Image (spheres, rainbow, N blue to C red):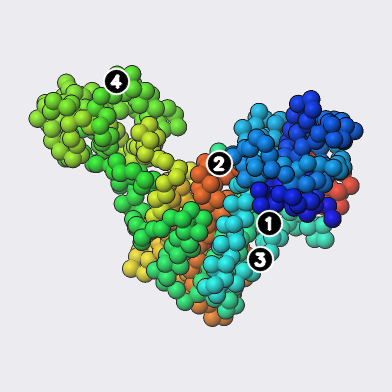
Amino acid sequence: MYRTNTCGELNISNVGQKVTLAGWVQRSRDLGGMTFVDLRDRYGITQLAFNMEVNASLCEKARKLGREYVVQATGTVTERASKNNKIPTGEIEIIVDELNVLNAAKVPPFTIEDQSDGGDDLRMKYRYLDIRRNPVRRNLELRHRMAMLVRNYLSSLEFLEIETPFLIKSTPEGARDFVVPSRMNPGEFYALPQSPQQYKQLLMVAGMDRYFQIVRCFRDEDLRADRQPEFTQIDCEMSFVEQEDVLQTFEGLAKHLFKEEKHLEFGDFPRITWHDAMRLYGSDKPDIRFGMQFVELNDVVKGCGFSLFDNAELVVGICAEGCAEYTRKQLDALTDFVKRPQVGAGGMVYVKYNSDGSFKSSVDKFYTQEQLKQVAEKFGAKPGDLMLILCGPAMKTRKQLNELRLEMGNQLGLRNPNVYAPLWVIDFPLLEWDEETQRFYAMHHPFTAPKPEDEALLDDPSRWGDIRANAYDIVMNGVEVGGGSIRIHDRELQNKMFHTLGFTDEKAAEQFGFLMDAFTYGAPPHAGLAFGFDRLCSLFGGADSIRDFIAFPKNNSGRDVMSGSPSPIAQDQLDELMIDVRPIANK
Ligand code: ASP
């Protein structure tokens, strides 16, 4: 037997027992007469003790152990003279009488400690060493527990976990596909799934009325911060349900996770329409851990001779409670913040509601004290508050103000990662206009059903932008953790949708023919949703980055720096696949 116990479980109740442990050397201390070695495994650290007087050669052997050596030690659990109450095994040590070096180790390129001295790149290159560190290990443990909770919960509700293929037909759904050449069918390609969307809908046609899968998805997108080309979803689909059933079911799942993992209980999650979310927060994923809702000011600020406001489509602001004392420097910094290219505002107007009841603003030239009072009333502001105002085209300005609101939330400490504020955003628009290609795209995906009461608008292209979808997102702390929709199960409506999206009959048949065909064989009404599992784990872990919750993530350029992928392949492999990678000029 390699070990009788792990390095995390022995305590005072085990004193006197003969045990064998195996693990990695965290560190060793040579105190002359005694040598101590901290032995580490996944479960914890146990101190090994070697006494020069009792067994000199064994003690010599222990002294020679390097960091991260793999060793096996047999000895007796003994009460320690000087106890360490910071670790569960801190009251005991093992007086070793047999020590086996199972493997030597090179000195690791960074310290295997909670606060490592390794930078991001180094840690990723040696990820297997990084995972030995507590914070990373704990993240993976959290991920495992979350996956188990999801499986058990959904399984208890009759959901079946069914695997769907990874080598599928390329049917661009939004992002770019990763493609895989087929050797047996030269010149033809599979795609890796962006999501199992069509297969899960086919499973509904197949009568598997509750499906889920914790599944890898692949999207060849330009990597924005904290996106991974391969990521994991909790992918779900249900038949014979309305939106309410779906929201209840997955709100139930979210509550279950909060309860089991975080010991948090929630009432009904608030719901907000997409339109209200945009109007009140300038975002379809509002962070409602704090208020600071938008206040629209057109009716109180226009017509006073301040041309910037007079000419703007929308004047809108937020009220930061108790910030009237902000200094010139702080206000300038906020102005610089909104003027950054990432935010893109032209400037910012402030109105201070001084504690003496007077007002001080950056537009004092244009507005009387009385007029500023009206502005303050509109905000419901109190003396001591600071109002921050932006103006311009409505949607653009809302998005800019969203950034400012989040920044103020950060500055005022209102975005505590240990506080959770989930909500549903519902009634998303069905279609989204794209300026560049001058056409509408499905905001969610082409299988999403319009609201029945808006369906007639599909016949009027001038109203396409107004059609609402039966689509919903689950949002937590300003992060979209999941989304889904009621699906179109009627072939005619689906055809109409494809036409709206600019598909000819032939193109639709070529790309989605199998799904369309399936719908002629009795497709039940169905709906579904997918959670971003990596993101959900990072949120539960109180961290911003999803990378820390993936065992072997890619870096920001989509590279696995540890294995060195992607990489060129050999010419004979290319030949076999009939792929010619020469630059076009040389062909
Ligand atoms: N397939 C969708 C997605 O990946 C989720 C869904 O509609 O169920 O976002």
Q: Residues within 10 Å of mark 1 (few under 14, many from 20)?
A: some
Q: Is mark 4 within 8 Å of ligand 1?
A: no
Mark in the foreground, 1 or 3:
3
- Badge 3 or badge 4: first in the primary sequence: 3
Considering every residue shown, the one lying at the far left of the view is 370
Spatial separation of the CA atoms under disc 2 and disc 3: 28 Å
Q: Which residue lies under the disc numbered 2?
A: 545
Question: Left or right: 43 with respect to 182?
Answer: left
- Percent x, y for residue 407? 39, 34
- Badge 1 or badge 2: first in the primary sequence: 1
Spatial separation of the CA atoms under disc 1 and disc 3: 13 Å
Residue 164: assigned label: 3
- Between 541 and 30, the residue placed more toward the observer is 30
Q: Residues within 10 Å of mark 4 (few under 14, many from 20)?
A: few
Considering every residue shown, the one lying at the far bottom of the view is 522
Q: Amino acid at mark 3?
A: Thr
Q: Which residue lies under the disc numbered 1?
A: 191
Identify which residue is drawn at 70% across, 31% down.
111
Identify which residue is drawn at 44% across, 29% down.
341
Q: Amino acid at mark 2?
A: Ser
- Percent x, y for residue 327? 29, 20
Spatial separation of the CA atoms under disc 3 and disc 4: 58 Å
Q: Which residue lies under the disc numbered 4?
A: 327
At numbered mark 3, what does the secondary structure look like: helix, strand or loop? loop
- Badge 2 or badge 4: first in the primary sequence: 4
Q: Residues within 10 Å of mark 3 (few under 14, many from 20)?
A: some
At numbered mark 2, what does the secondary structure look like: helix, strand or loop? loop
- Badge 1 or badge 3: first in the primary sequence: 3
Please say if the residues under marks 3 and 4 sit with CB atoms less than 8 Å apart.
no
Question: Based on the displayed image, in which of its 4 quarters is residue 381 positioned?
Answer: top left
